[in-house]
Amino acid sequence: MPEIRFAEPKDIDALTAMRLEMLSELGPREDGFLPDDAFAERTRAYFGHGDGLTVLAEEDGVTVGCATLCFVRVMPTPSHPTGLRGHLMNVYVRESFRRRGTARRMLMQIIEEARRRGATEIILDATDAARPLHAALGFAGSDEYMQLEL
């Protein structure tokens, strides 16, 4: 069973590699985007200085999964009085380690830490395969969400 822990600065290379591995596994995008060196460097910079938290799953000293929650501060509202919200990204477990509860354990740790820090909401973009897990943890769809891509 992989150990789940919060990432530290020494983990930036492993985190960046896991994110690139995950994006590669998703396959080509319709818009033709391919991660390049500049993208990898921006990813490294976020892990080094971004406002978020990441958990790692490790087994025998090898990183086998990760999940990141990016914090976003907005003006407080009555339903979100702290103004702190989270965007869950890059929930990924290597294929040979899947279906063993690793992603669930990573997400439970992230959710608890987000609560502890005062976040009032977590949003995410989920693949079809991940939707049952997210629903089991209490995530629900919303009719309120709209988006403008720039």
Image (cartoon, grey):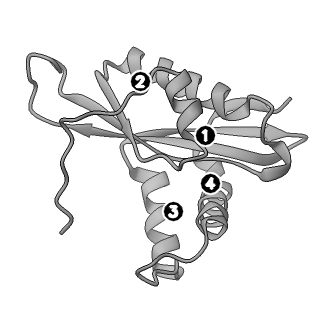
Q: State the residue position of label 3.
A: 44
The answer for how far apart the CA atoms under marks 1 and 3 are is 13 Å
Q: Which image quadrant for residue 105? A: top right
Q: In x, y percent, where is residue 2? A: 81, 33
The residue indicated by pointer 1 is 7
Is residue 77 toward the left or the right of residue 113 in the image?
left
Among the two numbered marks 4 and 2 on one chain, the one whose residue lies closer to the N terminus: 4
Q: Is residue 48 above or below residue 104?
A: below
- Sequence-wise, the earlier of marks 3 and 2 is 3
> Could you tell me the amino acid type at mark 1?
Ala
Q: Position of residue 55 (x, y in %)?
A: 60, 36
Residue lying furthest right in this view? 60
Q: Are marks 1 and 4 in contact (CB under 8 Å)?
A: yes
Residue labelled with disc 2:
114
Q: Nearer the viewer, residue 14 or 9?
A: 14
Residue at 54% over, 47% down? 128
Q: Which amino acid, mark 2? A: Ala
